[in-house]
Amino acid sequence: MPPRITALTDPEPGASSRRLVWLAAGQDGVPLGSAYLRLFSREGQEHLAEVEISVHPAERRRGVGTRLLEAAVAAARSDGRRSVLAQAEEGSPGDHFLAARAFRRVLALTYARLVLADVDLAEITRLAELPHPGYRLTAWEGAVPPALAGSYADSRRAMDDMPMEGTDYGTVVWDVDRVLAAAEAVGKRGDLLHTVAALDTADGSVVGFSELVVPGDGQGDGQHYGTAVLPGHRGRGLGRWMKAESIRRARERHPGLTGLLTDTATGNAPMLGINDELGYLPTHRAVEYQLGL
């Protein structure tokens, strides 16, 4: 018999999205799988939804995933969404599932990890202390200092031309309120946000940034949220400079950290090169799929 699909609602919508949830269960009530649909609400992405489906391995190939996907896609369509994104590890059952259901492969991502115990700290420190005429580094924890808030929000457009291939991701509009809300969201869940920024010494404005989120207890793996440089300041080694300083600070501030995680569009050769030079080792690749509604 087909699974029973029960619709739920996430009681705590985020600052930039809300979620719908479906639970698939057998006739005996035993859970078989779930689907989460994220409906983006921030300006520039109101057309977008993202689905994540999970089915117990023993229950696959019995129509559970298909029923969950149908429910999520129908909800996205009724909410007026234009595109639905989904991600799966390359070569996984999820990869094959999405490819067989009208989703189009639009982006490949390379995931990598830096093992902090293997880091050549002397070399990282050397890279972090290299002079870059016309620029200086600064850093903060949590929310951006008020004096830098305006130019930091402006610097977020450095991510606008990040290689996204055919993804209908839209344009995220950043202002000071959104920057502060993002930092607050990280803090509310108990994590620590560390930012290293490159400043133009001519006017003190932020021209690049590198964000790292660390578990609140300082243990386990940290996650890079983004490293980017404004177009007019690229080609001067600022990305590597900031990321090296981020690594150095993480080692110093959180000795219990074991690794740093990052993911990069496979077409983003400059950032992949920086990661390779700093010692990040690829762990796996993922595929981003898109369904037009």
Image (cartoon, rainbow, N blue to C red):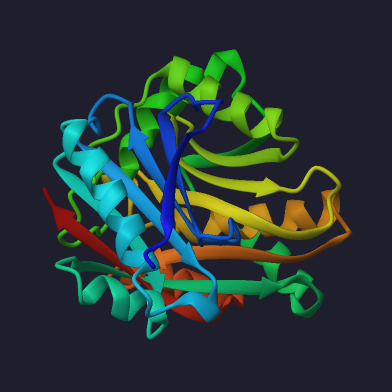
The answer to which of 11 and 146 lies nearer the viewer is 11
Marks counted in the figure total 0
Kindly tell me whether residue 55 is visible in this rendering.
yes
The answer to which of 57 and 177 lies nearer the viewer is 57
Kindly tell me whether residue 203 is visible in this rendering.
no
Quadrant of the image occupied by residue 175: top left
Determine whether 35 is above or below 145 in the image: below
Rendered residue at 38%/35% (across/down): 156
Determine whether 125 is above or below 193 in the image: below
Rendered residue at 76%/48% (across/down): 215
Rendered residue at 42%/23% (across/down): 151
**Residue 153 percent across, percent down from the top left:** 41, 25
Determine whether 28 is above or below 204 in the image: below
Rendered residue at 33%/52% (across/down): 234
The quarter of the rendered structure image containing the N terminus is: bottom left
Q: Residue furthest bottom?
A: 91
The answer to which of 289 and 209 lies nearer the viewer is 289
Q: Is residue 259 left or right of residue 50?
A: right
Quadrant of the image occupied by residue 80: top left
**Residue 4 percent across, percent down from the top left:** 43, 54
